[in-house]
Amino acid sequence: MRTNTTLAALLAGMTALAGCGRELVGGGQRNVDAAATGDGTGSGSAGLAQRYAVAPGGGGVFQANGIGGTITFDARVYLVRNAQPVPLNGPATATVRADGRDTVAVASGRVPEVEYPTARVVFTRVTGNVTGGLVIGGVSLTGQVSVAIADSVVVERPVDLGDADDDATLLIDLDASAWLQAANPVTRIVPAAAFQGAVKLRRG
């Protein structure tokens, strides 16, 4: 009888500890979605002024932010905590309008219910199909433009996705109007550093 009582007490204690363990590691889960827009700071946002482009003679000419066309990319999305990446479902291929007038789903997942101070997006391909509005050195450029990616380009930014138990959306703002203007008009290649520096990550 004493043995049975001792065993029951031991099992109860183990169950309690297991419950505490789940709490310590944030036993619940939260939903996090990732979405992308082509230009959250371009013509897709109201009230933004036009930009200057530099003509061959050195004079400035107005260029509207409204670059027509699409941006297609392949990427993996991660949330990072204590240098440990937690992947969302992927990899993903997505196509968005270059002018920022749409937002498309990229990835989603259920992750441990903790705060993630950093987001990481690993791009393996980025190409643009420009239909108009891109002026480089006073010359209009249309057609395919590609980011120079040998293996991958990693964009990692601090983000605030809200409280640990909040569902959230991570917005990948490609800011296409910034890096497309860095394209070489002959090769139609954008330096990886220009693309990497332009992309923004924030809560959607």
Image (cartoon, rainbow, N blue to C red):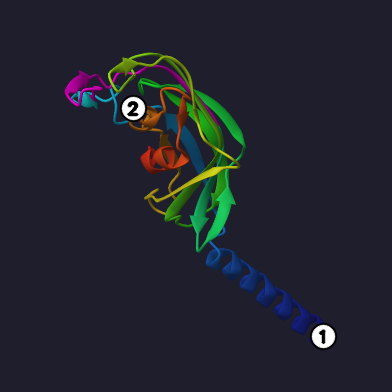
Residue pointed to by mark 2: 177
Residue 133 drawn above or below residue 21: above
Residue 15 drawn above or below residue 128: below
Label 2's element? helix
Q: Amino acid at mark 1?
A: Thr
Q: Position of residue 109 (x, y in %)?
A: 57, 42
Residue 21 drawn above or below residue 139: below
User: Which residue is found at the position 44% from the left and 56% from the top?
Assistant: 115
Q: Residue furthest bottom?
A: 2
Is 69 in the magenta? yes
User: Which residue is found at the position 27% from the left and 18% from the top?
Assistant: 138
Q: Residues within 10 Å of mark 2 (few under 14, many from 20)?
A: many
Q: Quadrant of residue 110?
A: top right
What range is drawn magenta here? 54-73
Identify the mark nearer the N-term, 2 or 1.
1
Q: Position of residue 49 (x, y in %)?
A: 18, 25
Q: CA distance from mark 2 to mark 1?
A: 74 Å
Q: Nearer the viewer, residue 168 or 129?
A: 129
Is 68 in the magenta? yes
Q: Residues within 10 Å of mark 1 (few under 14, many from 20)?
A: few
Residue pointed to by mark 1: 3
